[in-house]
Amino acid sequence: MNQKFKLFVLAAVFAMALFRSANAQQQLTMFWPGPLTPSDEKVFKDWAGKVTADSKGAIAVDLKNNSPLANFGNIVDRVENNVVQIGIALTSALPGRFELTNVVSVPFTMDLNDDNKAAAALWRVYKEGLLDSEWKTVVPLFVGVSKQAGFHFAKAPASLDHLEGLKMRIFTSGHVPLVQGLGMQPVSLPPADQYQALQRGTIDGDITSWTTFPSYNLAEVTKYHVDLPLGGSAFVVFMSRKQLEQLPPAGRSAIEANSNEEFSRAFDHALFEDAEKGRASASGPGQTTVQLTAQKTDEWRKKFGEPMIEQWQQANGPQAPKVLAAFKKAYADVKAGH
């Protein structure tokens, strides 16, 4: 083999290696920090499959969950440091970082029961640019909102008018005035610790949504439930802005094309299905679910709800009233079918 032919072969091998490298499929891990329900898993896999197909081989998204890779407390850090590429954040588990996004947790602002409305409204608020200050290094791809939070007690209280001394787990500081106003002691715990705390009597009750019941088997450790319009929790599927910009063009285009209200509605519907299963799991013998009377609801709204709403606005700066007004408008529009 002469020298020219050797050089030709080497050049061809090098060119082929460059071609394969340029056309190698980039693997992205999509991570959900908690236990997956079938409804949530379907939405995430549908999105991952659509993005993978639309990228025409440029990227492949692989769903993982509930492993040491990340948890709800460090998921943003794990995404920013490329441990996982796409994360699902529970924004209420990250105090101080996404307080405007937590507008969905403001009590007495949404219907007690809704489906596919809160997430669509939150997505529209984000697309208006009103939440940009919280999403500089990471970018939302779609969102979901758990159903309304209520009271869930390990055992029936003597009366809803006499809750003094009970320890109540909260998921947002916005619940503190209500809990303290009713004479209870607020306790902050991550989602994964709810079950054991209720089982051991570390807490007497939990402010949470029916949505969480299937994932954490909360019907096993709660017996008395009060449906209340105490706001939901925002779940945001997101990616590092830097990593998104570094993807192959076809991969980036596929992700951006599927970052939309359609998938937000689908995620919201999955969380609604989880809530229905959660409610059903707590409907057997020994379980009681009640709703406040219209008179009691109005009383609590005036006594606790209005001050809580005002406190949320004051605590989160001049942008907060704009975000709340925009969310209420978007929510009303979605309800009206617009």
Image (cartoon, grey):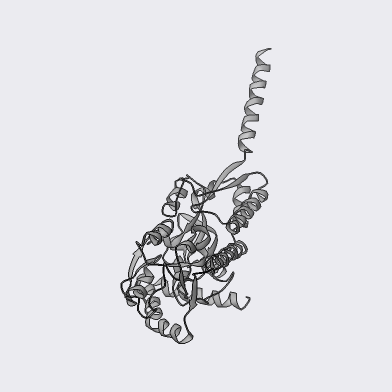
Query: Percent position (x, y) of residue 125?
Result: 52, 69
Seen at 61% across and 45% down, the residue is 59
Residue found at the very far bottom of the displayed protein: 295
In this rendering, is residue 145 above or below 111?
above
Which quadrant of the structure image shows residue 46? Answer: bottom right
Give the total number of marks visible in the rendering: 0
In this rendering, is residue 277 above or below 33?
below
Query: Percent position (x, y) of residue 10?
Result: 63, 22
Query: Percent position (x, y) of residue 60?
Result: 61, 45
Question: Can see residue 316?
Answer: no
In this rendering, is residue 297 above or below 204?
below
Q: Is the C terminus in the top left, top right, bottom left or bottom right quadrant? A: bottom right
Which quadrant of the structure image shows residue 280? Answer: bottom right
Near-viewer residue (172 or 319): 172
Left or right placement of residue 31 versus residue 96 in this view: right
Left or right placement of residue 53 versus residue 92 in this view: right
Q: Is the N terminus in the top left, top right, bottom left or bottom right quadrant? A: top right
Question: Can see residue 332?
Answer: yes
Which quadrant of the structure image shows residue 14? Answer: top right
Seen at 36% across and 64% down, the residue is 203
Seen at 60% across and 53% down, the residue is 255
Near-viewer residue (17 or 213): 213
Near-viewer residue (155 or 242): 155
Query: Percent position (x, y) of residue 263?
Result: 61, 61
Residue found at the very far top of the displayed protein: 1
In this rendering, is residue 9 above or below 308?
above
Near-viewer residue (136 or 155): 155
